[in-house]
């Protein structure tokens, strides 16, 4: 027996957290019946599982791809507004992949795509405190007091938040370039933190996720991860 959300993650449908949303929304059927109860277990060999009318099958091959996302792409498979998605930057792959976390439409940088639901769950769950590193260009000169606010905590609409660390990389009269490290997963957290201290974000690039770094991968380019890179991701997501 296997938990339904873990089964969906193992099939490459989504992460476990996103699978719970699919279940509670009534989009998942087991043997023809809609399932709404989180924590439901299934027989992964005998039971027929469907998501949105499509059969979910266990993935035999694990695939791990790093993409240097361009601004102007949404981090979803399709978009009701007709905007380009990150999958437009990838070839047609046999395996169904999903993005691990998101980058905003106007953000750029490191995006991991995989069908390894267990790894995705570890990388995104706050309990594992996986660091995410961003290079952020903000308006104006950031003062010492503002740096302290970012690391001590700022009240946001979704609750208090803070950066794990902040470092000044470059500064001019009109703009500051920061390195921001987060171990939380609040939506648009970097932008909201910077806006809360009076320095709106002009540009944002994610350069690292756990043990994985963007390196010299060009904008809009992608590659399959090496075995060492995959192992580094697992190491960085150990509790």
Image (cartoon, rainbow, N blue to C red):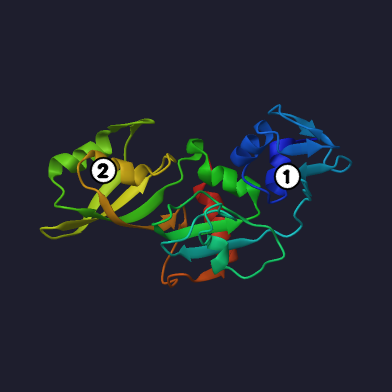
Residue 195 - label: 2
Judged from this view, the residue extending furthest toward the left is: 173
Q: Is residue 164 visible?
A: no
Q: Using the rendered view, name the quadrant where residue 6 is placed.
A: top right
Q: Is residue 168 left or right of residue 14?
A: left
Q: Is residue 109 above or below residue 148?
A: below
Residue under the point 32% across and 41% down? 192
* Mark 2 vs mark 1: in front: 1
Q: Is residue 201 left or right of residue 68?
A: left
Residue 212 - label: none
Q: Quadrant of the N terminus?
A: top right
Residue under the point 20% across and 39% down? 148
Q: Secondary structure at mark 2?
A: helix
Judged from this view, the residue extending furthest toward the front is: 81
Residue 162, percent across and down? 32, 37
Q: Is residue 83 left or right of residue 169?
A: right
Residue 185, percent across and down? 44, 41
Q: Secondary structure at mark 1?
A: loop
Residue 52 - label: 1
Q: CA distance from mark 2 to mark 1?
A: 38 Å
Q: Using the rendered view, name the quadrant where residue 15 is placed.
A: top right
For label 2, the crowd category at 10 Å Cα-Cα, with few meaning under 14, some 14 to 19 and many 20 or more, is some
Residue 141, percent across and down? 14, 52
Quick one: label 2 or label 1, which is nearer the N terminus?
A: 1
Q: Nearer the viewer, residue 14 or 224?
A: 14
């Amino acid at each position: 027996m296997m938990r339904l959300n873990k089964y969906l993650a193992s099939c490459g449908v989504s992460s476990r957290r996103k699978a719970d949303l699919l279940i509670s929304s009534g989009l998942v059927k087991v043997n023809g019946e809609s399932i709404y109860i989180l924590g439901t277990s299934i027989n992964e060999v005998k039971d027929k599982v469907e998501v949105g009318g499509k059969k979910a099958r266990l993935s035999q091959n694990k695939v791990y791809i790093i993409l240097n996302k361009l601004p102007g792409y949404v981090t979803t498979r399709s978009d009701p507004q007709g905007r380009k998605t990150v999958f437009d930057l990838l070839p047609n792959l046999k395996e169904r992949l999903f993005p691990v976390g998101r980058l905003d439409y106007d953000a750029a940088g490191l995006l991991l795509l995989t069908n390894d639901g267990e790894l995705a769950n570890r990388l995104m769950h706050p309990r594992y405190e996986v660091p995410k590193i961003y290079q952020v260009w903000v308006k104006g000169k950031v003062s010492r007091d503002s740096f302290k606010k970012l690391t001590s905590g700022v009240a946001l609409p979704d609750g208090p938040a803070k950066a794990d660390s902040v470092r000044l990389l470059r500064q001019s009269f009109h703009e500051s370039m920061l390195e921001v490290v987060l171990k939380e997963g609040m939506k648009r957290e970097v932008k909201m933190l910077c806006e809360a201290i009076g320095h709106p974000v002009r540009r944002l690039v994610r350069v690292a996720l756990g043990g994985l770094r963007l390196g010299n991968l060009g904008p809009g380019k992608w590659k399959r991860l090496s075995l060492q890179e995959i192992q580094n991701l697992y190491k960085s997501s150990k509790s």
